[in-house]
Amino acid sequence: MSLLVAVVAAAVFLAAQARGAHPMMPLALFRSRVVAVSLVIGFMLNAAYYGGVFVFSPYLQQERGESALHAGVMFIPMTALVAVVNLASAKLAARFGPRVPMAAGQLSGFSRLLALLTVEPYTNVWVVATLMVPVGLGGALTMPALTAMLLDAVPADRAGTAGAVLNTGRPNDEVTGPRRGESDAQHTAQAPARC
């Protein structure tokens, strides 16, 4: 039902934007190939990164029996180098153009996402944490160059709108939190007690 409501709301929003004299999100932005490709890549990258957090948090806690604190610590290797790699991405983009760090980042992230498919309930948790590192590094290499390429492709007065649309693809707790809470409660009610 909520998917249907989302689809209807999106259709109404797009119709209003197409007809409005001063649209909040001018649909002409999407005519640019660079903008469209940047938004698709940004959405996929964010879905992979945040989807990994969303999937592996319950895996570590429910399947592996780790505490919430220990599960959180497992994500530190994935996020620890992001600030440094973001700066490296900017330098690589300045030297080789934005496509080099974007391609390197996506290849890094994608290869490790494939490796994460091999994770089993008995896989050492530090192996899992290590496999997640290139996913974070891939995002950190890709996003600065992607954002710069996107913002360069739009008029200056539309840069804020383009950045906002890019960030809209980022899953967040306001969207996923309540649904996840429901599924956790249902899982807890149906699962046998662990002794």
Image (cartoon, helix red, strand yellow):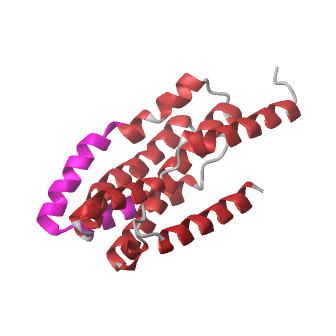
Where's residue 172, x and y in %?
53, 44
Which residue ends up furthest to the front in the rendered image?
A: 21
> Between 12 and 97, which is closer to the camera in this rendering?
12
Question: The N terminus is located in which quarter?
Answer: bottom right
Name the spot of residue 99 as percent of width and height, x first.
Answer: 26, 70
Q: Position of residue 178 (x, y in %)?
A: 67, 38
Instruction: Find out whether residue 188 is within the magenta segment.
Output: no
- Seen at 37% across and 72% down, the residue is 29
* Closest to the observer, 125 or 81: 81
The answer to which image quadrant residue 79 occupies is top left
Q: Is residue 101 visible?
A: no
| Residue 191 visible in the current orientation | yes
Q: Is residue 101 magenta-colored? A: yes
- Residue at (35, 71) in percent of width and height: 35
User: What count of labels does the image hold?
Assistant: 0
Give, as a single range, the part of the protein colored magenta. Answer: 80-108
